[in-house]
C-alpha cells in the first residue's frame, strides 16, 4: 500500500518504520521541510523516507494521522487540496473529539479511529525506540470506514497485535478513562505513573473513576466501577516506571492534550447533566499550569 504518516513523532515513526519493513511504500509529512528524512528503528539500519512530497499525498491509499489531538486540524489543512476521496484516513492519538472535525473537512473519505498501547520513544530526530509491546484496535468512524476491516490484517503483518473492533467507541472511551485518571494527576504532581498506587491517591482515583463510570454509562458504554478501577490500576502498575505523556508535556512546558482528554469528558458530562467535580478540578489545574507559561 501507499501509506503516508502525518506526524512522525514517536508512534508515527514506529508505524512508518514497521510499515516500510513489511514492504509498504511509506512517506512522511512532518514539520521539517527537508524532502528526505531518515528513521532508524532500534538496531535496524536507518531507512530513508520522502517528506512533504505532494505526489505521496495524492497517491496515498492510507493516511495515518499521528499528530497530537490538538494538532490534527492544523496538520491536515495543507494536505486537503491533494487528498483523493478514496484515501482512507486513520486517526491514532490520545483523547477523543477530532474525528467529527476531520469528517467535516473530508466528508467523502473512509474514516478510521485507532488506539494503541505500544510504547515508543524518539531520543533524537532520526532514532525511534520501540519501548513497549502493545496492541492496536481499529474501527470505522463513518460508513465507508466501517468497510475497511481488511486494514487490521495489513497492519497486523507490520506490527502485531492489531484487531478490528466493531465497538471501537467503547475502546476509545476506555483509553480516554485511563488517560483521564493517570495523565492530569501525574502532570500536576510531576510523578511517575506507578506513584499513583500510593494510598494518598486512592480517594482521588476512586472519585475520578465514579464520575467516569457515570458519564460512560450515559454514553452507552457498559462498564462498572470495579472493572474500570481495576483497568486503571492495571495500567498504573504496568507502566509504573513511565512518565505519562501529559507529565512530559508539562515538564517541557508544551501544550497538553487536556482539552481532548478531560475536556472531552467534561463536555459529555455537561451534555448529560452529570456533575464531575473531581475531573473538573484536574482540568482547571492543568489549564492554569498552561496559562502560567504564557504569563512568564
Ligand atoms: O497513554 C498514556 C499516556 O501517557 O499518555 C498512559 C497509558 C497513561 C501511559 O503513560
Image (cartoon, helix red, strand yellow):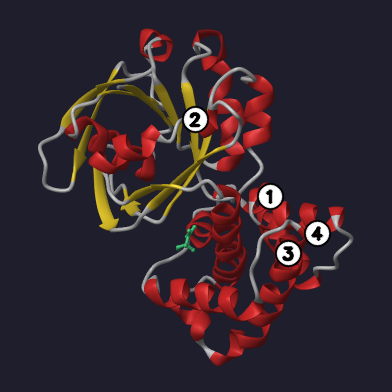
The x and y percentages for residue 72 are: 57, 33
Disc nearer the start of the sequence (3/1): 3
Label 2 neighbour load within 10 Å: few <14, some 14-19, many 20+: some
The residue wearing badge 4 is: 269
* Depth check, front residue: 114 or 153: 153
Q: Earlier in the sequence, mark 1 or mark 2?
A: 2
Q: Circle 2 is placed at which residue position?
A: 147
Cα separation between marks 3 and 1: 21 Å
Q: Is mark 2 within 8 Å of ligand 1?
A: no
Residue under label 3:
217
> How far is the residue under mark 2 from the one under mark 4?
31 Å
Q: Secondary structure at mark 4?
A: helix
Residue 63 in view, yes or no: yes
Nearer-N-terminus badge (3/2):
2
Q: Residues within 10 Å of mark 3 (few under 14, many from 20)?
A: few
Residue in view at x 51 percent, y 73 percent: 231
Give the image quarter of residue 188.
bottom right
As measured in the structure, the alpha-carbon distance from the residue carrying label 4 to the one carrying label 3 is: 11 Å
The residue at which mark 1 appears reads as 259
Amino acid at each position: 500500500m501507499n501509506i503516508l504518516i502525518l506526524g512522525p513523532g514517536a508512534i508515527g515513526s514506529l508505524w512508518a518504520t514497521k510499515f516500510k519493513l513489511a514492504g509498504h511504500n511509506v512517506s512522511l509529512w512532518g514539520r521539517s521541510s527537508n524532502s528526505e528524512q531518515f528513521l532508524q528503528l532500534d538496531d535496524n539500519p536507518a531507512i530513508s523516507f520522502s517528506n512533504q512530497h505532494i505526489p505521496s499525498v495524492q497517491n496515498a491509499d492510507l493516511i495515518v494521522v499521528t499528530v497530537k489531538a490538538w494538532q490534527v486540524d492544523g496538520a491536515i489543512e495543507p494536505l486537503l487540496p491533494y487528498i483523493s476521496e478514496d484515501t482512507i484516513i486513520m486517526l491514532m492519538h490520545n483523547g477523543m473529539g477530532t474525528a467529527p472535525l476531520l469528517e467535516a473537512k473530508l466528508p467523502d473519505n473512509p474514516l478510521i479511529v485507532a488506539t494503541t498501547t505500544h510504547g515508543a520513544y524518539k531520543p533524537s530526530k532520526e532514532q525511534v525506540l520501540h519501548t513497549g509491546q502493545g496492541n492496536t484496535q481499529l474501527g470505522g468512524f463513518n460508513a465507508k470506514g466501517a468497510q475497511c476491516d481488511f486494514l487490521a490484517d495489513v497492519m497486523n503483518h507490520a506490527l502485531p497485535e492489531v484487531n478490528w473492533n466493531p465497538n471501537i467507541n467503547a475502546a476509545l472511551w476506555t483509553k480516554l478513562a485511563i488517560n483521564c485518571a493517570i495523565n492530569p494527576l501525574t502532570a500536576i504532581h510531576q510523578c511517575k505513573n506507578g506513584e499513583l498506587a500510593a494510598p494518598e491517591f486512592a480517594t482521588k482515583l476512586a472519585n475520578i473513576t465514579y464520575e467516569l463510570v457515570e458519564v460512560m454509562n450515559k454514553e452507552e458504554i457498559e462498564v462498572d466501577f470495579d472493572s474500570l478501577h481495576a483497568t486503571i490500576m492495571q495500567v498504573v502498575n504496568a507502566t509504573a516506571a513511565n512518565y505519562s505523556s501529559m507529565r512530559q508535556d508539562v515538564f517541557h512546558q508544551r501544550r497538553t492534550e487536556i482539552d481532548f482528554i478531560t475536556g472531552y469528558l467534561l463536555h459529555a458530562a455537561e451534555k448529560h447533566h452529570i456533575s464531575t467535580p473531581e475531573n473538573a478540578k484536574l482540568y482547571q489545574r492543568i489549564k492554569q499550569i498552561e496559562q502560567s507559561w504564557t504569563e512568564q
